[in-house]
Image (tube, coloured by chain):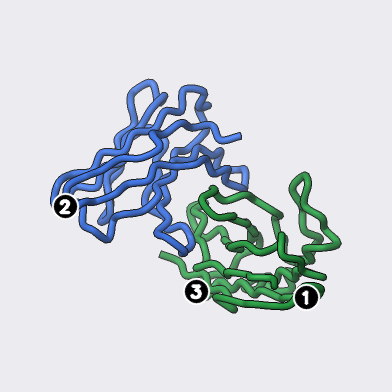
Chain colours: A blue, B green
Protein backbone atom coordinates (compact mmCIF):
# COMPACT_ATOMS: atom_id res chain seq x y z
CA UNK A 1 0.00 0.00 0.00
CA UNK A 2 1.05 3.57 -0.66
CA UNK A 3 2.34 5.39 2.39
CA UNK A 4 0.98 8.74 1.27
CA UNK A 5 -2.40 10.44 0.99
CA UNK A 6 -3.16 13.16 -1.52
CA UNK A 7 -6.31 15.01 -2.58
CA UNK A 8 -8.03 13.31 -5.49
CA UNK A 9 -8.13 16.41 -7.65
CA UNK A 10 -7.29 20.11 -7.72
CA UNK A 11 -7.80 23.02 -10.06
CA UNK A 12 -5.40 25.89 -10.62
CA UNK A 13 -5.62 29.00 -12.77
CA UNK A 14 -3.04 29.36 -15.50
CA UNK A 15 -0.14 31.55 -14.39
CA UNK A 16 -0.85 31.03 -10.69
CA UNK A 17 1.14 28.86 -8.32
CA UNK A 18 -0.11 25.32 -7.89
CA UNK A 19 0.37 23.95 -4.37
CA UNK A 20 -0.09 20.19 -4.14
CA UNK A 21 -0.16 18.73 -0.63
CA UNK A 22 0.86 15.27 0.48
CA UNK A 23 0.53 13.59 3.86
CA UNK A 24 3.06 10.96 4.89
CA UNK A 25 2.54 10.75 8.62
CA UNK A 26 4.23 7.34 8.97
CA UNK A 27 7.40 8.33 7.15
CA UNK A 28 10.61 6.92 8.57
CA UNK A 29 13.78 8.89 9.18
CA UNK A 30 15.56 7.39 6.19
CA UNK A 31 12.70 7.68 3.70
CA UNK A 32 12.83 10.24 0.92
CA UNK A 33 9.84 12.06 -0.54
CA UNK A 34 9.62 11.84 -4.34
CA UNK A 35 7.27 13.61 -6.72
CA UNK A 36 6.42 12.42 -10.20
CA UNK A 37 3.74 13.44 -12.64
CA UNK A 38 2.02 11.57 -15.43
CA UNK A 39 0.52 13.31 -18.39
CA UNK A 40 -2.20 11.30 -20.11
CA UNK A 41 -0.92 8.20 -21.91
CA UNK A 42 2.72 8.89 -21.07
CA UNK A 43 5.18 7.44 -18.58
CA UNK A 44 5.68 9.21 -15.24
CA UNK A 45 8.10 12.13 -15.27
CA UNK A 46 10.46 12.80 -12.36
CA UNK A 47 9.96 16.21 -10.77
CA UNK A 48 11.89 16.48 -7.53
CA UNK A 49 12.77 14.67 -4.33
CA UNK A 50 14.02 15.50 -0.84
CA UNK A 51 14.76 14.13 2.60
CA UNK A 52 14.56 16.94 5.16
CA UNK A 53 15.42 20.24 3.57
CA UNK A 54 13.34 22.15 1.10
CA UNK A 55 14.42 21.61 -2.48
CA UNK A 56 14.07 23.63 -5.66
CA UNK A 57 14.86 22.90 -9.27
CA UNK A 58 13.85 24.26 -12.65
CA UNK A 59 10.47 22.53 -12.49
CA UNK A 60 9.25 22.96 -8.94
CA UNK A 61 9.89 23.49 -5.26
CA UNK A 62 9.40 20.91 -2.54
CA UNK A 63 8.55 22.08 0.96
CA UNK A 64 8.84 19.44 3.69
CA UNK A 65 7.49 20.19 7.16
CA UNK A 66 9.88 20.06 10.06
CA UNK A 67 8.31 16.87 11.43
CA UNK A 68 8.43 15.44 7.87
CA UNK A 69 4.85 14.23 8.13
CA UNK A 70 3.71 16.24 5.16
CA UNK A 71 5.05 18.07 2.15
CA UNK A 72 3.91 20.42 -0.58
CA UNK A 73 4.94 20.49 -4.20
CA UNK A 74 4.84 23.98 -5.65
CA UNK A 75 4.66 24.75 -9.35
CA UNK A 76 5.36 28.48 -9.29
CA UNK A 77 3.61 29.52 -12.51
CA UNK A 78 1.31 26.76 -13.71
CA UNK A 79 0.72 26.37 -17.43
CA UNK A 80 -1.83 24.31 -19.32
CA UNK A 81 0.93 21.75 -19.97
CA UNK A 82 1.16 21.10 -16.23
CA UNK A 83 -2.24 19.39 -16.29
CA UNK A 84 -1.42 15.85 -15.13
CA UNK A 85 -1.71 13.36 -12.29
CA UNK A 86 0.88 14.14 -9.61
CA UNK A 87 2.21 11.33 -7.46
CA UNK A 88 3.84 11.77 -4.06
CA UNK A 89 5.88 8.71 -3.05
CA UNK A 90 8.00 7.94 -0.02
CA UNK A 91 10.84 5.51 -0.44
CA UNK A 92 13.91 4.36 1.40
CA UNK A 93 16.87 4.99 -0.85
CA UNK A 94 18.22 1.51 -0.42
CA UNK A 95 14.96 -0.07 -1.54
CA UNK A 96 14.34 -0.23 -5.23
CA UNK A 97 10.70 -0.07 -6.14
CA UNK A 98 8.11 2.69 -5.85
CA UNK A 99 4.56 2.16 -4.66
CA UNK A 100 2.18 4.48 -6.49
CA UNK A 101 -1.00 5.72 -4.88
CA UNK A 102 -3.84 7.26 -6.89
CA UNK A 103 -2.16 10.70 -6.95
CA UNK A 104 -3.74 14.14 -7.43
CA UNK A 105 -5.27 15.06 -10.76
CA UNK A 106 -4.28 18.69 -11.33
CA UNK A 107 -6.24 20.63 -13.90
CA UNK A 108 -4.76 23.96 -14.96
CA UNK A 109 -7.54 26.16 -16.25
CA UNK A 110 -7.17 28.99 -18.79
CA UNK B 1 17.46 13.86 -16.80
CA UNK B 2 18.23 10.30 -17.86
CA UNK B 3 16.35 8.86 -20.83
CA UNK B 4 14.52 5.55 -20.97
CA UNK B 5 12.93 4.39 -24.21
CA UNK B 6 10.37 1.70 -24.95
CA UNK B 7 9.52 -0.09 -28.15
CA UNK B 8 6.96 -0.42 -29.52
CA UNK B 9 4.85 2.47 -28.27
CA UNK B 10 1.66 0.74 -29.35
CA UNK B 11 0.87 -2.82 -30.36
CA UNK B 12 -2.29 -4.63 -31.35
CA UNK B 13 -2.25 -8.42 -31.46
CA UNK B 14 -4.58 -11.37 -31.72
CA UNK B 15 -5.51 -13.43 -28.72
CA UNK B 16 -3.06 -16.28 -28.17
CA UNK B 17 -0.04 -14.60 -29.67
CA UNK B 18 3.06 -13.38 -27.81
CA UNK B 19 4.26 -9.80 -27.68
CA UNK B 20 7.72 -8.55 -26.77
CA UNK B 21 8.29 -5.08 -25.34
CA UNK B 22 11.78 -3.59 -25.12
CA UNK B 23 13.01 -1.13 -22.51
CA UNK B 24 16.32 0.66 -23.00
CA UNK B 25 18.30 3.08 -20.88
CA UNK B 26 19.81 5.37 -23.49
CA UNK B 27 22.44 7.38 -21.65
CA UNK B 28 23.16 5.36 -18.54
CA UNK B 29 23.60 1.80 -17.39
CA UNK B 30 20.97 0.19 -15.22
CA UNK B 31 21.53 -2.98 -13.27
CA UNK B 32 17.91 -2.86 -12.19
CA UNK B 33 14.83 -2.08 -14.23
CA UNK B 34 11.18 -2.30 -13.29
CA UNK B 35 8.05 -3.23 -15.17
CA UNK B 36 4.70 -1.69 -14.28
CA UNK B 37 1.20 -2.14 -15.63
CA UNK B 38 -1.51 0.50 -15.63
CA UNK B 39 -5.17 -0.13 -16.37
CA UNK B 40 -7.45 2.75 -17.41
CA UNK B 41 -8.08 5.30 -14.67
CA UNK B 42 -5.88 3.38 -12.25
CA UNK B 43 -2.43 3.96 -10.83
CA UNK B 44 0.74 2.11 -11.79
CA UNK B 45 1.14 -1.37 -10.36
CA UNK B 46 4.59 -2.92 -10.11
CA UNK B 47 4.77 -6.25 -11.91
CA UNK B 48 8.39 -7.26 -11.52
CA UNK B 49 11.93 -6.16 -10.86
CA UNK B 50 14.39 -7.01 -13.60
CA UNK B 51 18.00 -7.59 -12.57
CA UNK B 52 20.82 -7.72 -15.10
CA UNK B 53 22.31 -11.18 -15.30
CA UNK B 54 19.84 -12.84 -12.93
CA UNK B 55 16.22 -13.88 -12.68
CA UNK B 56 13.52 -11.29 -12.31
CA UNK B 57 11.59 -10.89 -9.08
CA UNK B 58 7.83 -10.93 -9.57
CA UNK B 59 5.21 -9.29 -7.41
CA UNK B 60 2.51 -11.40 -5.83
CA UNK B 61 -0.16 -12.38 -8.30
CA UNK B 62 1.97 -11.83 -11.41
CA UNK B 63 2.55 -15.04 -13.35
CA UNK B 64 6.22 -15.41 -14.19
CA UNK B 65 5.53 -17.93 -16.93
CA UNK B 66 3.15 -15.54 -18.64
CA UNK B 67 5.22 -12.38 -18.32
CA UNK B 68 8.76 -13.36 -19.27
CA UNK B 69 11.44 -10.86 -18.39
CA UNK B 70 14.99 -10.87 -19.73
CA UNK B 71 17.64 -8.36 -18.68
CA UNK B 72 20.57 -9.44 -20.80
CA UNK B 73 22.58 -6.22 -20.71
CA UNK B 74 22.98 -3.11 -18.61
CA UNK B 75 20.88 -1.10 -21.04
CA UNK B 76 18.14 -3.49 -22.14
CA UNK B 77 15.31 -5.34 -20.48
CA UNK B 78 12.51 -7.10 -22.35
CA UNK B 79 9.04 -8.12 -21.27
CA UNK B 80 7.29 -10.82 -23.27
CA UNK B 81 3.58 -11.30 -22.77
CA UNK B 82 3.01 -14.90 -23.75
CA UNK B 83 -0.31 -16.19 -25.08
CA UNK B 84 -1.86 -12.78 -24.66
CA UNK B 85 -5.57 -12.48 -23.95
CA UNK B 86 -7.88 -9.45 -23.94
CA UNK B 87 -7.53 -9.07 -20.17
CA UNK B 88 -3.81 -8.43 -20.71
CA UNK B 89 -4.65 -5.27 -22.62
CA UNK B 90 -3.04 -2.49 -20.65
CA UNK B 91 -0.40 0.24 -20.58
CA UNK B 92 2.99 -1.29 -19.78
CA UNK B 93 5.69 1.02 -18.43
CA UNK B 94 9.30 0.31 -17.60
CA UNK B 95 11.70 2.28 -15.46
CA UNK B 96 15.35 2.24 -14.52
CA UNK B 97 17.40 3.58 -11.66
CA UNK B 98 19.94 6.21 -12.66
CA UNK B 99 22.33 8.15 -10.50
CA UNK B 100 21.26 9.45 -7.09
CA UNK B 101 18.68 6.67 -6.75
CA UNK B 102 16.24 8.44 -9.03
CA UNK B 103 13.97 6.28 -11.10
CA UNK B 104 13.29 7.30 -14.70
CA UNK B 105 10.36 5.96 -16.64
CA UNK B 106 9.89 5.02 -20.24
CA UNK B 107 7.05 6.48 -22.34
CA UNK B 108 4.98 3.31 -22.04
CA UNK B 109 3.63 0.68 -24.44
CA UNK B 110 -0.08 0.36 -25.02
CA UNK B 111 -1.02 -3.25 -25.66
CA UNK B 112 -4.39 -4.12 -27.14
CA UNK B 113 -5.27 -7.80 -27.46
CA UNK B 114 -8.17 -8.56 -29.76
The answer to whether B42 appears left or right of B65 in the picture is left
Looking at this view, name the residue that lies furthest to the front. Answer: B114
Residue assigned mark 2:
A14
Residue shown at 31%/35% (left/top)?
A72
Q: Whole-percent x and y of residue A89?
A: 48, 40
Q: Secondary structure at mark 2?
A: loop
The reply to whether label 2 and label 3 mark residues of one chain is: no
Q: Whole-percent x and y of residue A38?
A: 43, 56
Residue assigned mark 3:
B27
The C terminus of chain A lies in quadrant: bottom left
Q: Nearer the viewer, mark 1 or mark 3?
A: 1
Residue shown at 40%/59% (left/top)?
A39
The reply to whether label 2 and label 1 mark residues of one chain is: no
Vertically, is A94 above or below B48? above
Mark 2 and mark 1: Cα distance apart in space: 45 Å
Q: Secondary structure at mark 1?
A: loop
Q: Disc 3 sits on a residue from what chain? A: B
The N terminus of chain A lies in quadrant: top right
Residue assigned mark 1:
B18
Looking at this view, name the residue that lies furthest to the right. Answer: B65
Q: Whole-percent x and y of residue B52?
A: 72, 65
Q: Disc 2 sits on a residue from what chain? A: A
Vertically, is A53 above or below A42? above
The answer to whether B30 appears left or right of A53 in the picture is right
Q: Which mark is residue A54?
A: none
Q: Nearer the viewer, mark 2 or mark 3?
A: 2
Pointers 2 and 1 in contact (C-beta within 8 Å)? no
Residue shown at 34%/31% (left/top)?
A64
Between residues B85 and A7, which one lies in front from this camera angle?
B85
The answer to whether B58 appears left or right of A45 in the picture is right
Amino acid sequence: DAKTTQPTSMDCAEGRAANLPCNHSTISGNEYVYWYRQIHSQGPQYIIHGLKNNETNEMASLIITEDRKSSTLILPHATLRDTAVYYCIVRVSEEQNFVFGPGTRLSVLP
Amino acid sequence: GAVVSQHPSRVICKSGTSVKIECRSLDFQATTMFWYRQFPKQSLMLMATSNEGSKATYEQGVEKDKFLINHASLTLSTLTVTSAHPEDSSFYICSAIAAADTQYFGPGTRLTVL
